Structures are given as C-alpha cells and as structure tokens.
Amino acid sequence: QVQLVESGGGLVQAGGSLRLSCQASGRTLSTYNMAWFRQAPGKEREFVALINWNGSGTTYVDSVKGRFTISRDNAKNKNTVYLQMNSLKPEDTAVYYCAASGYYNGVNRREYGYWGQGTQVTVSS
C-alpha cells in the first residue's frame, strides 16, 4: 500500500507560479499511474492532470493546458510526482490532491484508490 503526502501549496498572486510535490512512501511509485485533482469550496473534486507509470503519457484538463505541467521522478530516493503551475489565476484556487492507481489511467476520481491529504493553493487577484 502506498501513502501520499502533498506539499508546496501556498498563497500567490495572479500570474505567479507554484510547484506542488507528492511524495510516496510504502511502495515504489513506478507501479502507479498518478493524477492531480483539485477541489474548490462548494464544488466537486475535479481532475487536473495525470501521468502514466513511466512518464510517457500525460493528460490535462483544458483549463490548465499550457500552464500546468505534471512530471514524476521514480528514482528510489525521490519517489515523487510534481505539478508545476505557471500563470496562475484566481480560479485555480483550491485544495490540490494527488492520487494513485495501480491499474487506472483516466480522469474519474472514483477509480483512484490512494489519496493524499491535500495542499491549499490560493491565488489572489
């Protein structure tokens, strides 16, 4: 079983950048497809980006394409997935969660069995 811990959130002005990290423990990350989701107050948790187990494939929600980049480092001493967020907008404000699946590589949050606790991202206008 894998445990996930997100970090890197914070308060940033519109147009700024943040890099989120999701570090895994318990099992090597290379056996999992990974995704980032976000949840704004009063809204459902929505898909943001995903990366397959070896990093050869990525998918983004339209609203972040060209601004966000998902990547991963499967090295034993890293075991981390990243979300580089540039040109941030106030509508990006949300709690960001990373998620893992050993078999699923899609946008449906219900197919991901492992979740972190989330990290808050707040973008001021």
Image (cartoon, helix red, strand yellow):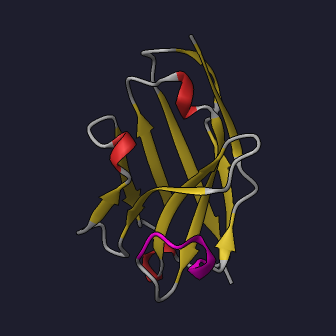
State the residue in front, 25 or 62.
Answer: 62
Coordinates of residue 103 in the picture (x, y in percent): 46, 89
Coordinates of residue 109 in the picture (x, y in percent): 58, 71
State the residue in front, 89 or 58.
Answer: 89
Q: Residue furthest bottom?
A: 103
State the residue at coordinates (48%, 23%): 89
The relative height of residue 95 versus residue 16 in the rendered view (above or below) is: below
**Image quadrant where residue 50 sits:** bottom left
Image quarter where the N terminus lies is bottom right
Residue 79 visible in this rendered orientation of the protein:
no
State the residue in front, 47 or 17.
Answer: 47
**Image quadrant where residue 114 sits:** bottom right
Q: Which residues are magenta?
A: 106-112
State the residue in front, 3 or 35.
Answer: 35
The relative height of residue 31 versus residue 24 in the rendered view (above or below) is: below
Residue 42 visible in this rendered orientation of the protein:
yes
State the residue at coordinates (69%, 48%): 43
Q: Is residue 56 left or right of residue 87?
A: left
Q: Residue furthest front?
A: 42
Coordinates of residue 7 in the picture (x, y in percent): 65, 43
Q: Is residue 76 left or right of residue 57?
A: right
State the residue at coordinates (53%, 77%): 28
Residue 41 part of the magenta segment: no
Coordinates of residue 5 in the picture (x, y in percent): 69, 56
Image quarter where the C terminus lies is top right
Q: Is residue 118 left or right of residue 60?
A: right
Q: Is residue 59 left or right of residue 103?
A: left
The relative height of residue 96 versus residue 104 in the rendered view (above or below) is: above
State the residue at coordinates (55%, 23%): 90
Q: In the rendered picture of this protein, how many numbered marks are placed on residues?
A: 0
